[in-house]
Amino acid sequence: MGLIAILSSPSSFTETGAMDKIRAVIAQGSGIFHYEVEKHKDISEALTRFKQAHVDAIVILGDRALSSATFEHIVENERFKDMDIPLAVLPAGDNNIVAENLGAAHSEPHRALEDILHRHQTGRLLNGVVGSSLLKVEGVRGVGYLYGLFLCAGEITKQRHIFHRAVSGRGVIQKFRTWWDILRLILSAYGGAGGKADLRNAIRINRNQRGAVVGHFFMLLITTLEKSLLGVALKQNIKPGAAHFVSVENTKNAVIQTAKQMLRGKYERAEVAGHVATDIQHARIVLQTPFVLDGSYYEVDDSGELFVTVTDHLKLVRLD
């Protein structure tokens, strides 16, 4: 059994007090290299030490800001260009959607950590390593750009409980809960669709430089994950350097068409009225309303435009 690295951010757990439980789990384990970071610059030092120690995998245990900053250091720092260490993302609040997509079965960080350490100790941790591209999102107010795995905009972002939802697990009860959450979301969307349009909510989308579409959208989703919100599957085996793209106009017909696909658990590739599911390499998005990246809310800068590109390939650890 090799060495496993844990990169944690205590500030992510200030309100919940979960850091003490995390430290207790780590103290009971073996073959663990734990590095707690407080500032952005600390991540570079942590990754350097992990690389020197030849760790088998790096576990990211902090909110979405920690995973995005880790992705950034690996992609843009020359010292890490040849670093081919798989990354595991565990739930820590606002990054639960990413963690669940990668197979986490518990919302409590310390329980998810117990699961991954058990897999490491039994030699099964690297059995589920997959490749995934990143999204680079430029035009973010206050920070310039960020890296992530899914971006969401449109009316759906008003449903904050969807993005801060606890990890559902894998049992029958959890599946029923997911189905019920989808039904509630669709009923709410249907009730609000097709009403008087607010120009401030209009979104302009340019996919792969093939002409722009302007409209009001219930949902705009761009992701490199295999599943989207609420576990709805996307087409597998997308082309290298591409991301999944789903847009749903804010009309009753489009919402109903999308509802059928969500309840079946998979988005179809055929374009139907008001619903598009395809692949993209990049997109320009003009909007005035907040958007979500990996579970956290952001605003566009004064230009009003986001530029989303599919960038470097990383190895991620799946836990299911």
Image: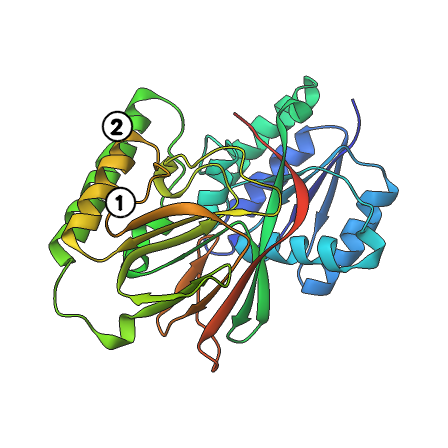
The secondary structure type at the circle numbered 1 is loop
Decide which of tag 1 and tag 2 comes sooner along the chain.
2
Which label belongs to residue 176?
2
139 on left or right of 81? left
Q: Nearer the viewer, mark 1 or mark 2?
A: 1
Residue 136, compared with residue 53, is above or below; it is below
- CA distance separating discs 1 and 2: 27 Å
In the rendered image, is residue 11 in sight? no
Where in the figure is residue 174, as x and y percent of width and height? 32, 28
Q: Which residue is mark 1?
A: 272
For the N terminus, give its image quadrant: top right
The secondary structure type at the circle numbered 2 is helix
Furthest residue to the right? 52
Furthest residue to the bottom? 302
In the rendered image, is residue 313 in sight? yes
Q: Quadrant of residue 290?
A: bottom left
Furthest residue to the top? 122
Q: Residue at x 32, y 31 (%)?
A: 265
Which label belongs to residue 249?
none
Q: Residue at x 57, y 44 (%)?
A: 20
Q: Residue at x 85, y 55 (%)?
A: 79
Q: Quadrant of residue 121?
A: top right
Q: Amino acid at mark 1?
A: Val
Q: Amino acid at mark 2?
A: Phe
User: Pointer 1 and pointer 2: residues touching (CB < 8 Å)?
Assistant: no
Where in the figure is residue 117, as x and y percent of width and height? 64, 28
Near mark 2 (Cα within 10 A), the count class, few <14, some 14-19 or many ≥20, is few
Near mark 1 (Cα within 10 A), the count class, few <14, some 14-19 or many ≥20, is some
75 on left or right of 94? right
